[in-house]
Image (cartoon, rainbow, N blue to C red):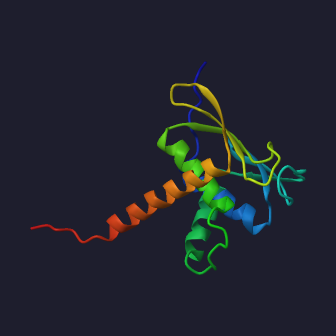
Amino acid sequence: MRRLARLHPVNYSTALRCIGQDLESRGLRTLDIISDSTGYIVLAGYQPPPAPMPVSLQYTPADILELDSAGQEQRGTSSPTKEFVSLVQILRAIGGYLDKNQARLIRISNNEAPGSSPSFSVEYETKEGERIVDDRDGSAIYDMCVSMYKQRRKVDHSAKLPSHSR
Protein backbone atom coordinates (compact mmCIF):
# COMPACT_ATOMS: atom_id res chain seq x y z
CA MET A 1 0.00 0.00 0.00
CA ARG A 2 1.39 3.40 -0.96
CA ARG A 3 1.67 5.76 1.99
CA LEU A 4 -0.09 9.09 1.51
CA ALA A 5 2.05 12.15 2.08
CA ARG A 6 1.07 14.72 4.65
CA LEU A 7 -0.12 17.79 2.76
CA HIS A 8 -0.92 20.25 5.55
CA PRO A 9 1.43 23.22 6.08
CA VAL A 10 1.31 23.17 9.90
CA ASN A 11 1.80 20.43 12.43
CA TYR A 12 -1.16 18.50 13.82
CA SER A 13 -0.77 20.03 17.27
CA THR A 14 -1.33 23.52 15.86
CA ALA A 15 -4.02 22.52 13.35
CA LEU A 16 -6.07 20.55 15.88
CA ARG A 17 -5.69 23.30 18.52
CA CYS A 18 -7.05 25.84 16.03
CA ILE A 19 -9.95 23.56 15.10
CA GLY A 20 -10.66 22.95 18.80
CA GLN A 21 -10.70 26.70 19.52
CA ASP A 22 -13.13 27.27 16.67
CA LEU A 23 -15.39 24.41 17.77
CA GLU A 24 -15.39 25.65 21.39
CA SER A 25 -16.22 29.20 20.28
CA ARG A 26 -19.22 27.80 18.40
CA GLY A 27 -20.37 25.78 21.43
CA LEU A 28 -19.82 22.43 19.67
CA ARG A 29 -19.07 19.48 21.95
CA THR A 30 -19.45 16.32 19.86
CA LEU A 31 -17.10 15.86 16.93
CA ASP A 32 -15.82 13.67 14.16
CA ILE A 33 -12.72 15.12 12.44
CA ILE A 34 -11.60 13.58 9.17
CA SER A 35 -8.26 14.56 7.64
CA ASP A 36 -7.91 14.42 3.87
CA SER A 37 -5.76 15.93 1.13
CA THR A 38 -7.78 19.19 1.16
CA GLY A 39 -7.67 19.78 4.93
CA TYR A 40 -10.10 18.71 7.62
CA ILE A 41 -13.80 17.90 7.49
CA VAL A 42 -15.62 18.17 10.82
CA LEU A 43 -19.05 16.83 11.68
CA ALA A 44 -20.12 18.27 15.03
CA GLY A 45 -22.99 18.65 17.47
CA TYR A 46 -23.99 20.84 20.39
CA GLN A 47 -24.84 18.11 22.90
CA PRO A 48 -22.37 15.96 24.86
CA PRO A 49 -21.47 12.67 23.14
CA PRO A 50 -22.97 10.47 21.99
CA ALA A 51 -25.22 12.86 20.09
CA PRO A 52 -26.44 13.82 16.63
CA MET A 53 -23.97 15.92 14.62
CA PRO A 54 -25.96 18.33 12.44
CA VAL A 55 -23.08 20.77 11.81
CA SER A 56 -20.61 20.21 8.97
CA LEU A 57 -17.47 22.35 8.70
CA GLN A 58 -14.43 22.27 6.46
CA TYR A 59 -11.00 23.67 7.31
CA THR A 60 -8.45 24.19 4.55
CA PRO A 61 -4.77 24.76 5.29
CA ALA A 62 -5.37 28.49 4.67
CA ASP A 63 -8.24 28.44 7.22
CA ILE A 64 -5.93 26.86 9.81
CA LEU A 65 -3.26 29.51 9.23
CA GLU A 66 -5.89 32.26 9.56
CA LEU A 67 -7.29 30.74 12.78
CA ASP A 68 -3.75 30.44 14.15
CA SER A 69 -3.01 34.11 13.40
CA ALA A 70 -6.27 35.20 14.99
CA GLY A 71 -5.55 33.01 18.00
CA GLN A 72 -2.06 34.51 18.43
CA GLU A 73 -3.60 37.98 18.57
CA GLN A 74 -6.08 36.89 21.27
CA ARG A 75 -3.66 34.91 23.47
CA GLY A 76 -3.47 36.32 26.95
CA THR A 77 -6.61 38.44 26.49
CA SER A 78 -9.25 35.74 27.00
CA SER A 79 -10.34 34.43 30.37
CA PRO A 80 -8.72 31.15 31.43
CA THR A 81 -10.66 27.95 30.82
CA LYS A 82 -12.67 26.57 33.71
CA GLU A 83 -11.65 23.02 32.86
CA PHE A 84 -8.07 21.80 33.00
CA VAL A 85 -8.74 19.40 30.13
CA SER A 86 -10.69 21.35 27.51
CA LEU A 87 -11.46 20.29 23.95
CA VAL A 88 -8.66 22.57 22.75
CA GLN A 89 -6.12 20.94 25.07
CA ILE A 90 -7.29 17.43 24.17
CA LEU A 91 -7.01 18.05 20.42
CA ARG A 92 -3.63 19.77 20.85
CA ALA A 93 -2.34 16.79 22.87
CA ILE A 94 -3.60 14.29 20.28
CA GLY A 95 -1.92 16.39 17.58
CA GLY A 96 1.30 16.47 19.58
CA TYR A 97 1.22 12.69 19.87
CA LEU A 98 0.75 12.35 16.09
CA ASP A 99 3.56 14.85 15.41
CA LYS A 100 5.95 13.13 17.83
CA ASN A 101 5.29 9.76 16.20
CA GLN A 102 5.37 11.16 12.64
CA ALA A 103 1.93 9.68 12.04
CA ARG A 104 -0.70 10.76 9.52
CA LEU A 105 -4.12 11.56 10.97
CA ILE A 106 -7.10 9.84 9.41
CA ARG A 107 -9.91 10.49 11.90
CA ILE A 108 -10.69 11.63 15.46
CA SER A 109 -14.08 11.10 17.09
CA ASN A 110 -15.53 11.56 20.56
CA ASN A 111 -18.97 10.29 19.52
CA GLU A 112 -18.43 6.56 19.75
CA ALA A 113 -18.48 5.67 23.46
CA PRO A 114 -21.37 6.52 25.77
CA GLY A 115 -20.65 7.63 29.32
CA SER A 116 -19.75 10.63 31.41
CA SER A 117 -15.99 10.21 31.00
CA PRO A 118 -14.51 11.73 27.82
CA SER A 119 -13.42 9.16 25.29
CA PHE A 120 -11.73 9.73 21.94
CA SER A 121 -11.06 7.36 19.08
CA VAL A 122 -8.01 8.33 17.03
CA GLU A 123 -7.37 6.62 13.72
CA TYR A 124 -3.99 7.22 12.12
CA GLU A 125 -1.32 5.74 9.89
CA THR A 126 2.16 5.17 11.31
CA LYS A 127 5.29 6.22 9.43
CA GLU A 128 5.69 2.53 8.52
CA GLY A 129 2.24 2.57 6.87
CA GLU A 130 0.35 0.61 9.55
CA ARG A 131 -3.21 1.76 10.22
CA ILE A 132 -4.02 2.13 13.94
CA VAL A 133 -7.28 2.84 15.80
CA ASP A 134 -6.41 4.08 19.28
CA ASP A 135 -9.30 4.45 21.74
CA ARG A 136 -8.39 6.78 24.62
CA ASP A 137 -10.48 7.00 27.79
CA GLY A 138 -10.63 9.96 30.18
CA SER A 139 -7.53 9.06 32.22
CA ALA A 140 -5.39 8.45 29.12
CA ILE A 141 -6.56 11.77 27.66
CA TYR A 142 -5.76 13.54 30.93
CA ASP A 143 -2.25 11.99 30.92
CA MET A 144 -1.68 13.16 27.32
CA CYS A 145 -2.76 16.70 28.23
CA VAL A 146 -0.50 16.81 31.32
CA SER A 147 2.43 15.53 29.26
CA MET A 148 1.82 18.18 26.58
CA TYR A 149 1.51 20.88 29.27
CA LYS A 150 4.85 19.85 30.82
CA GLN A 151 6.52 19.70 27.41
CA ARG A 152 5.26 23.16 26.46
CA ARG A 153 6.22 24.59 29.85
CA LYS A 154 9.75 23.16 29.53
CA VAL A 155 10.10 24.76 26.07
CA ASP A 156 8.76 28.10 27.39
CA HIS A 157 11.21 28.10 30.31
CA SER A 158 14.24 27.10 28.23
CA ALA A 159 13.47 29.90 25.75
CA LYS A 160 13.55 32.43 28.62
CA LEU A 161 16.85 31.30 30.13
CA PRO A 162 19.79 33.64 29.55
CA SER A 163 22.59 32.26 27.44
CA HIS A 164 25.96 31.83 29.13
CA SER A 165 28.36 32.68 26.33
CA ARG A 166 31.87 33.75 27.07
The quarter of the picture where the N terminus appears is top right
Query: Residue lying farthest top?
Result: 1
Q: Is residue 27 above or below residue 113?
A: below
- Residue 6: image x %, image y %? 56, 38
Tell me residue 161's x, y (percent). Answer: 28, 70
Q: x, y (%) of residue 18?
A: 63, 60
Question: Which sits in the foreground, 25 or 111?
Answer: 111
Q: Is residue 100 left or right of residue 113?
A: left
Seen from the viewer's position, the closer of residues 120 and 70 is 120
Q: Is residue 35 visible?
A: no
Where in the figure is residue 128, as x and y percent of width and height? 51, 25
Q: Residue at x 56, y 33 (%)?
A: 5
- Measuring 50% from the left and 61% from the top, which residue is drawn there? 149
The residue sitting at 71% across, 63% down in the picture is 22
Q: Is residue 152 left or right of residue 38?
A: left
At 63% across and 55% down in the image, what residue appears? 90
In the displayed orientation, state which residue is furthest to the left: 166
Which quadrant does the C terminus fall into? Answer: bottom left
Instruction: Determine if residue 159 is in view.
Output: yes
Q: Is residue 92 above or below residue 153?
A: above
Tally of marks: 0
The answer to whether 54 is drawn above or below residue 24 in the figure is above
Residue 66 falls in which quadrant of the image? bottom right
Is 65 in front, or is 52? 52
